[in-house]
Image (cartoon, helix red, strand yellow):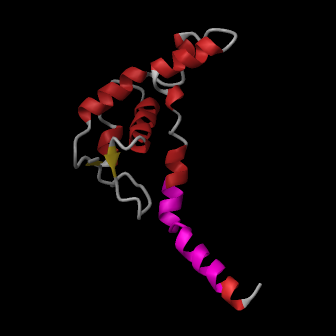
Amino acid sequence: MTGNSFAMYLTWLLTSTPPDAELANAQFLAGYRRDWLFEPDLTEEISDLAVGKESPSERLFDPVILNEVRDRVADGDLLREAFGCLPGRPAPLVRAGVLHLLWKQQWSVDLSVVLSAGSVLRTAS
């Protein structure tokens, strides 16, 4: 590799690799990206294509929770507040719904720092 091509490679490497916090946040939130785990219409379409039908009890997440979370979480809420916005619902499902909606850009957060309970949710514009 010549000096010039190495410098170009190094420049590419340094400019195309996201900072550690952004990369960690993206990798974490990517676990909540799959619509078919949440959205009933997509779940029904996928199950229609499958050999056997999927029963509602086999859905991994309750899509009703997504609507309730959308209604309850407001601009400026902390992530911990969003996680606790539906005390009558199973906490793991509420957390999964909040993180799915965050992935879908229902809200925005500062991804330059590692997500925490104190991360502030902002209405996406």
Q: Is residue 87 visible?
A: no
**Image height check: is 79 above or below 3?**
above
Nearer to me, 56 or 82: 56
**Image height check: is 9 above or below 105?**
below
| Residue that appears at 32% across and 37% down | 84
| Residue that appears at 22% across and 41% down | 74
**Image height check: is 82 above or below 19?**
above
User: Residue most toward the left?
Assistant: 75
Location of residue 57 in the rendering, given as x and y in whole percent from the top left corner = 54, 12
Q: Is residue 74 toward the left or the right of residue 107 in the image? A: left
Location of residue 95 in the rendering, given as x and y in whole percent from the top left corner = 42, 37
Q: Which residues are magenta?
A: 7-25
Image quadrant in which you'd find residue 7: bottom right
Q: Quadrant of the N terminus?
A: bottom right
| Residue that appears at 55% across and 42% down | 31
Residue 8 among those drawn in magenta: yes
Location of residue 23 in the rendering, given as x and y in whole percent from the top left corner = 53, 60
